[in-house]
Image (spheres, rainbow, N blue to C red):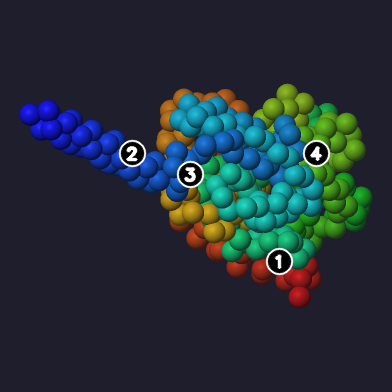
Amino acid sequence: MKGNRKFVALLLVGIMAALVLLSAGCGQKQAGSSGEQNYPTKPVNMIIAFTAGGSSDVQARIMQKYWDKLVKQPWVFQYKTGAGGAIGFAEIAKSAPDGYTIGGVNVPHIVLQPLGQGAQYTIDDFEYICQVVNDPQVLAVRKDSKFKSVKEVLDFAKKNPEKLKVGIVGTFTGHHLMLLDLQDKTGIKVTQVVYKGAADQNAALLGGEIDVMIGNVNDVMRSLEQMRVLAVASEERSKFLPDVPTFKEEGLDIVSDIRRGFVAPKGTDPKVVQFLRDTFKKIAEDPEYLKDMEKAGQPAEYMSGEDFEKYVREQNEKSKELLTKFGLLKA
């Protein structure tokens, strides 16, 4: 009798142990759907390739607020600035593909720098998470500038070759590409003045170091009381600047924007990439996030990782043409 009871007790212990192991196994499988058990288990490095306070930083900070609501582990911001973003983008590309380093990228910056500067990365070195911003570029001057229109700027530049000082953020960047497009379509010759980030560029314009600047809608929104935006390089007027004409309205076929998105190093576990894509999509669709983006002057436009990668490759081909025309394509 005692033997039977002992046998039953041992049998029950065995069954319970099996159930515990089975449960743990199921839990591991579920957590493993994000690439590793309970990913992320530690803070994730977020590399920003431009200066703190610039448009890229502002957008990522807004997104961080909503990431923190969905994911237990925070982002640790790292600023790797210079060369129009090339230093930061290369830092992302060469980081360990373990899911613990991701970063913000700008288009067309990431296609221009490998083409024209021999940057230490290519567009093949990333896993594309998503696009979150489509930020049209603008031509802006200080509020008290003598220039009141695009025509006045162009007339001055034509009469005074290389006298007009135009501020841009980096070479082989979206700003640089738009300046090349403007020069190509008008024949003007200017002096380009290069800055590391939008915050530096804004300060330079307001301080009188440059005559005009090529920036983005978001770059000028925070200093709008001190600036005059002469034109926006979009198909239609910006909802943030409804009174500002497009370049097309001014007689110039110029459409140019900066797309901001996020990537991980190539080779990152597909399950981790999918976790990141799903999480970023949830954030991008959050009504409160969209309200915060609008308040910050960030033109939100979500694009999936697959579509974002396709867009990047299309821009790569288009940029080749303009760089070749100006003799800037690296052999």
Rendered residue at 46%/46% (across/down):
36
Quadrant of the drawing holding the N terminus:
top left
Q: Residues within 10 Å of mark 2 (few under 14, many from 20)?
A: few
Judging from the image, what secondary structure is the residue with disc 2 in?
helix
Type of amino acid under label 3: Leu
Placement of 331 over or under 179, stated as above or below: below
Name the mark nearer the viewer: 2 or 4.
2
Query: Residue 178's quadrant in the figure?
Result: bottom right
Q: Which residue is mark 4?
A: 201
Q: Reading the chain from its start, which is encountered first: label 1 or label 2?
A: 2
- Is the Cβ of the residue at disc 4 closer than 8 Å to that at disc 3? no
Type of amino acid under label 4: Gln
Placement of 178 over or under 329, stated as above or below: above
Rendered residue at 77%/26% (across/down):
226
- Horizontal and vertical percent position of residue 12: 18, 33
Q: Reading the chain from its start, which is encountered first: label 4 or label 3?
A: 4
In this picture, residue 292 sits left or right of residue 278: right
Q: Reading the chain from its start, which is encountered first: label 2 or label 4?
A: 2
**Mark 1–mark 2 distance (CA, rounded to whole Å):** 50 Å
**Which of the pair 130/107 is nearer the observer?**
130
Label tally: 4
Q: Which residue is mark 2?
A: 24
Judging from the image, what secondary structure is the residue with disc 1 in?
helix
Query: Residue 319's quadrant in the figure?
Result: bottom right
Q: Reading the chain from its start, which is encountered first: label 1 or label 3?
A: 1
**Mark 1–mark 4 distance (CA, rounded to whole Å):** 24 Å
Instruction: Kindly identify which numbered label has been placed on residue 276.
Output: 3
In this picture, residue 199 sits left or right of residue 156: left
Instruction: Kindly identify which numbered label has been placed on residue 115.
Output: 1
Q: Does residue 202 appear anywhere in the picture?
A: yes
Q: Residues within 10 Å of mark 1 (few under 14, many from 20)?
A: many
